Each structure stands twice: as C-alpha cells, then as structure tokens.
Image: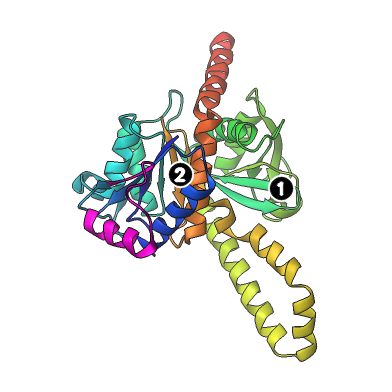
C-alpha cells in the first residue's frame, strides 16, 4: 500500500503531518511506502527534528515547491500552482505511483485537483465528502459534507449508492440505512429539492432508504448515511464540532469551580476519556471523497498528528476494501435497471 501525503497541508503543517507519518509507519504494517510531498528542505528539517529516519526504505520525500494556502480559492489555485504539494501528490495517484492521497490542506483545492486529475467514476457527476459522525449505534456518515454545495437530486442518489458501498466495504455494515436530511420525517416535508430527491431515492434499487430524517436523528437513530447537499452538510458538521467543543469547555469550567465536582471528575476520568475519543474528529482521521477515480482522503484543517495518522489509516482501508470497485458495480447495476425499464 502506497500513500501520498500532502505534508504541507493544514493549519499546523508540516509538524503534525510528519508526526502522523511517524505513527502511521509504526502502527500500520500494510503501509508499504509513504511519500511526503512538499517543500523538500522544510520537510527534511522537520523529519530531522522529529527523528524520522529518511533512510527508512518505506518513506520518501517528493519535492513540491509550491503550497496552496488554506484561504486560497480551490480550482483557480490548482490550475495556477501546478507544482503545489496537493497537485503533485494527486498526480502520484493519477499515475499509479501511489494508491491513495491524504491531505489536511485546502479542501476546495483537494476536491478540484481530484476532479480535474482523477476525474469522476462513470455514472458520477459530482464527488461528495463522507464525514464520520458518532451516534448511539455506531458511525453515521454525512454525505456530502462540503464538496458540492449546489447539488442536484440525482447527485444525492449517487451519494446514496456510494455511501452504501463505503459503509459495507470499510465499516462492515450488512445493510446500511440511508436517510435524507429534511425539516421533518413526513414524506411530504422539505423543499422542492428534497422532495424531488426523496422520490428518486424511493425508486432507487440497491439502497436501504429509510426516508426523511431530522437533525436529532443524527445521534439517536440508527443511520449509516445521511444525505444532503454540501452547503447544508458543511454547516451542519461545523456546528456539531463547535457545539461539542463548547460543551466540553463549559463542563470543565463547571467542574473546576467546585472541589466535590473535581473529585467526582477524577473518579470519572475514564468515562471522560472514552467520550472524548468517541466524539473527536481525530479518532476518525479523514473523510473519503467518494466518486472520483482514485482514493482521496480529506482531513480536518486543524488536524493533529493523531488525526493525520488515522486519515492515512482510512486511506489504507478504503484501498484494501476496493471501495471504488464496489461503487462502480453498484452504479452499473442501477444503470442496467434504468436501461431495462426504458
């Protein structure tokens, strides 16, 4: 398994990327080679500082003299900065030198580079980001979480098929439950967009569509994939993350204000640790960009070394479970059904 890591991507690059690389090489024996893509002299110095042995046959630095900033426009910058770490790492996947691309950098640029260089799979018009969210029953994926803010109903149908294939292949869910985000569970609720999407999903074979779902269902209902356009998905995901951080901060403040609460917190520290691990994006690492002809994992911009390590793990699992092959089979089956019906 060969992974190309955009070592210059993210708010805390390259330190966290090198730290994550060190851990990935240590913990994942299936990682045959890790390419660190970025400004060579910067990466060499950071590897030296953190003790990553560049004589290790499993690791290489691939020079990329340009960096795409987190605030730069995606597609325009990809076209302008052809020697950026995102572009060169994506080229490695395109050329077959790497099996997966991982980046905590500019999401728009990563999506644009993947779409331009790898293209979408046959039957897919727009790729979508599948972001993991823990709930009472396991893991639910929001799809799309930001790649396609102006989606059409048919795009969400493709997301349903791809999310189902990913849940089966990587998470081992036998019959993934797919819900459509709306402002009510009743079939007639929603906008014109969601109503049209609902109708198409009801007619789509090969998916376990359970109907409309609301915000609360993300946490208290057994769901594996929740569909929405990228605009709604991105706002929803960032709101959830901000709420989790705020509640954690408020809880710490309340505990520190009372000696008895502090004592209770010490006794409950195991539960707090488990809750933090379950609710933290670091645990899940990165989100696959489903629908492109290659494995692309997009990590959080503020990723830590642990998050980068886990993003690499997600890339390995996605390749290993041949998710794109399963997606293509499912899309082909739908196409055949549609063709026979016509």
Horizontal arrangement in the rendering, residue 61 relative to residue 269 (left or right): left
Question: Which mark identifies residue 199?
Answer: none
Give the mark nearest the N terminus, 1 or 2.
Answer: 1
- The C terminus lies in quadrant: top right
Residue 104 visible in the current orientation: yes
Q: Foreground: 114 or 59?
A: 59
Tell me where residue 260 sits by quadrant: bottom right
* Residues packed near mark 1 inside 10 Å, few (<14), some (14 to 19) or many (20 plus): some
Q: Position of residue 81 (x, y in %)?
A: 20, 48
Q: In the image, is residue 41 part of the stretch drawn in magenta?
A: yes
Residue wearing tag 2: 297
Q: Find the distance from the CA under tag 1 to the CA under tag 2.
A: 21 Å
Which SS class for mark 1? strand
Circle 1 sits on which residue? 138
x, y percent for residue 104? 41, 54
| Magenta span | 39-61
Contact, mark 1 vs mark 2 (Cβ under 8 Å) = no
Viewer can see residue 190: no
């Amino acid at each position: 398994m060969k992974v190309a890591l955009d070592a210059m991507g993210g708010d805390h690059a390259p330190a966290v990327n090198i730290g994550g690389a060190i851990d990935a090489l240590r913990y994942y024996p299936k990682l045959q080679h890790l390419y660190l893509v970025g400004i060579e002299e910067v990466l060499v110095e950071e590897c030296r500082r953190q003790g990553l042995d560049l004589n290790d046959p499993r690791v290489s630095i691939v020079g990329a003299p340009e960096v795409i900033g987190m605030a730069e426009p995606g597609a325009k910058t990809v076209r302008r900065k052809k020697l950026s770490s995102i572009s060169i790492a994506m080229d490695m996947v395109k050329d077959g030198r790497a099996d997966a691309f991982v980046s905590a950098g500019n999401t728009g640029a990563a999506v644009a580079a993947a779409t331009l260089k790898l293209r979408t799979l046959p039957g897919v018009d727009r790729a979508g980001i599948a972001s993991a969210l823990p709930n009472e029953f396991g893991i639910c994926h929001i799809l799309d979480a930001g790649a396609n803010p102006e989606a059409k109903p048919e795009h969400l149908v493709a997301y349903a098929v791809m999310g189902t294939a990913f849940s089966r292949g990587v998470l081992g869910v036998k019959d993934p439950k797919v819900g459509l985000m709306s402002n009510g569970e009743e079939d007639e609720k929603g906008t014109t967009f969601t109503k049209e999407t609902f109708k198409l999903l009801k007619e789509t074979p090969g998916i376990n569509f359970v109907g409309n779902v609301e915000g609360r269902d993300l946490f208290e209902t057994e769901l594996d994939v929740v569909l929405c356009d990228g605009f709604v998905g991105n706002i929803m995901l960032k709101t959830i993350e901000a709420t989790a951080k705020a509640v954690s901060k408020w809880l710490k403040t309340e505990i520190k204000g009372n000696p008895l609460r502090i004592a209770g917190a010490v006794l409950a520290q195991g539960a707090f640790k488990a809750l933090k691990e379950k609710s933290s994006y670091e645990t899940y690492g990165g989100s696959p960009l489903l629908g492109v002809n290659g494995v692309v994992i997009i990590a959080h911009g503020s990723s830590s070394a642990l998050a980068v390590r886990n993003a690499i793990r997600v890339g390995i699992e996605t390749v290993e479970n041949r998710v794109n092959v399963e997606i293509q089979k499912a899309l082909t089956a739908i196409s055949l059904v549609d063709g026979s019906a016509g």
